[in-house]
Amino acid sequence: MPVVGMVGGGQLARMTAAAAVGLGATFRVLAESANESAALVTHDVAIGSHLSLPDIAAFAAECDVITFDHEHVPGAILAELESAGVLVRPGSAALGYTQNKLAMRERLSSLGVPCPRFAPVVSVADVEKFAAGSWPVVLKAVRGGYDGKGVWVCDSAVEAAEVISHGIPLLAEEFVPFRRELAALVAMSPSGQGAAYPVVQTIQVDGICREVIAPAPGLDPDLAIEAEAMALGIAAQLGVTGLLAVELFETRAGGLLANELAMRPHNSGHWTIEGAVTSQFEQHLRAVLDLPLGSCVPAGTFTVMANLLGGTDPDVFDRYIHVMAADPTVKVHFYGKEVRQGRKIGHVTIVGGPGDSVESLRDRARRAASYLRWGTEDGE
Amino acid sequence: MPVVGMVGGGQLARMTAAAAVGLGATFRVLAESANESAALVTHDVAIGSHLSLPDIAAFAAECDVITFDHEHVPGAILAELESAGVLVRPGSAALGYTQNKLAMRERLSSLGVPCPRFAPVVSVADVEKFAAGSWPVVLKAVRGGYDGKGVWVCDSAVEAAEVISHGIPLLAEEFVPFRRELAALVAMSPSGQGAAYPVVQTIQVDGICREVIAPAPGLDPDLAIEAEAMALGIAAQLGVTGLLAVELFETRAGGLLANELAMRPHNSGHWTIEGAVTSQFEQHLRAVLDLPLGSCVPAGTFTVMANLLGGTDPDVFDRYIHVMAADPTVKVHFYGKEVRQGRKIGHVTIVGGPGDSVESLRDRARRAASYLRWGTEDGE
């Protein structure tokens, strides 16, 4: 079997390591330290920086193909690796669109993908012109934002001025009064095979994903097909290899707008570990190894995933026992991370059967996540 | 989280390592070499012999609890470890019954568990007396048999004489003309919590498990309950911690007879990785860590597991691609073992939905296993 290396030692690499065991692929991780989430469980760990060309090149020399746990490897390094003959999947051209939101917006718009109205802005005057009297306006860092960081909802020119004063490249976007947020997850292999998971609903709090419901309840089947086709089209047009997650707004008018892209396993796809025939982690490995893709068919009626955030008490173990005893069907995934207030330290998944309502599944997932965080079932 | 160490580096430890990732438990393996199945994927591998007290003691010193991938650690070593305060789960008293088939038979009989008629034998005359003119008679090595090794079906005193001539301790058992073979898999925690998986049908060829169908199709519900209760009763009476697999005969008269015991994850439970809410590997970890046990409820209607045996061509990878392409719902598990004719090198699993007949699932699983072995879908 070929050797696949993942740059980055976070929880996505950790869960990919577990998926590689069954697949029989040899899996390696480049982590920044031996204490990182994936480094704690992966057999073959290299320690190095994702910002260092020599570190990644040395790592890649022991792999047949490299892929990524995050989108933070500088584009120049990716291009250098490719010039040197390293198989980089997804490639630098595709990954560039996850690193530059303005380039992403411009490219998606040129492809005809519906997006929020946007414009680059450098001054308060630019923002005011963009707003044209209609606030709020969303300002986004062109580079480096994630989990709500790098996104500011501004209700006035005064608030926009505060963001502009940070001195970073920004784009302005219309504030979309959405009905709900959705995510479309697809995979594409170098051979051109594509596969689409059912479209899910994501529930964000303060810009952080808290819950995922798969498939999105009550979603118009035509809209679901439109979302899957949109994601597959973006993957094909941008030359993505591996997973592509497209975060979407379902607008109040009943349409779709593309929000963000990720080209790796994604929080909105954690439900697939138990909830789909092929997990997103195995699917990503299959795609980057150019193996035939696995079935994306759901294993249950509905699956609910709730992120587990750190609370104030680091001793999660006692609470873990309680959660296991209270609900023997809940599946807890710990990432091996130190507990810090608000940090994603794991997730819980419940796969529903014919008799389970979405609300009862959500309730059980939330109770488990709440108890693990706060020691009470209604803490969040 | 506490640290659990598994003695033995085979495929059971390999799959337990994958289960430990999600559970968040720190998992270590004591393997004989760095090339063993589990040693290839486990983060924390110690190299040593399961026949060496110092090796196991040194390993155990870095663990909160130790458990086993096999039943080959000598009882004297287990007892020494326990005397030294090591948490050994399952304990030496229970494990002793998996190492001595005569002691197992005597104990089960004393508990009232229905077993084939048996007797210790040392001479051909003993065997003839046991047979009382009714052949065949099954001779079994009291110690060390597995996968059909150490079991001889003798049609005559001449054949028995050949086995007796090996000079090893033997017991004789009646030859049971069974309808089919079943297996009951249960878990028991030190706190006394028990959990039972649905009873499965196993299909053996030449003493090696080839297929498992979960749950056993058409099994009388009363018989299923009897099998589960029998396994839970044995686990409780023998003081088993962790998994207990009871291999059973369903007799032509419609009753059950206990055949063999295993106190670890078992081949008859591999289907649980995809086919049950909690996999047997996670369940074993939960039990030995004295965590609340997980749900044993099936994820599908029927799940079929087929063992993948090595063929004559070691290059399984090309055939793997074909199998993935032919059936995107088949789940292949490779053990990272060198391909040798007849050796268990992996397994395939297919979880069925409401529309799938057991025969169609078996057919698909067999095709995949056959193609991986022989390069043709009807090679076995």
Image (cartoon, coloured by chain):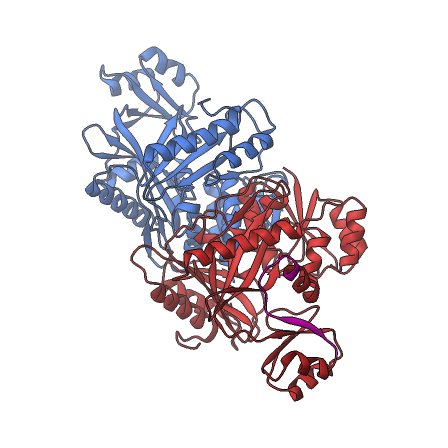
Chain colours: A blue, B red
Q: Which residue is nearer to you in this view: A272 or B197?
A: B197
Residue A233 point in image, percent of width and height: 27, 47
Q: Position of residue A112 (x, y in %)?
A: 22, 40
Identify whether B168 is placed above or below A72: below
Q: Is residue A343 visible?
A: no
- Which quadrant is home to the C terminus of chain B? bottom left
Total numbered labels: 0
Image quadrant in which you'd find residue A269: top left
Can the viewer see residue B9 in this picture?
Answer: yes
Q: Nearer the viewer, residue A2 or B184?
A: B184
Residue at horizontal 74%, vertical 73%?
B169
> Residue at coordinates 55% horizontally, 55% vertically from top-left?
B230
On whether residue A1 falls in the magenta region, the answer is no
**Which residue is nearer to you in this view: A375 or B43?**
A375
Q: Is residue A317 left or right of residue A173?
A: right
The magenta stretch is B109-122
Horizontally, is A83 left or right of B103 in the view? Answer: left
User: Residue B134: x percent and y percent?
Assistant: 59, 82
Decide: is A312 above or below B128.
above
Quadrant of the rendered structure where residue A365 is? top left
Residue A153 percent location from the top left of the image: 34, 20
On screen, A37 above or below A188? above
Q: In the image as oriented, which residue stretches furthest toward the top?
A: A158
- The quadrant the N terminus of chain B occupies is top right
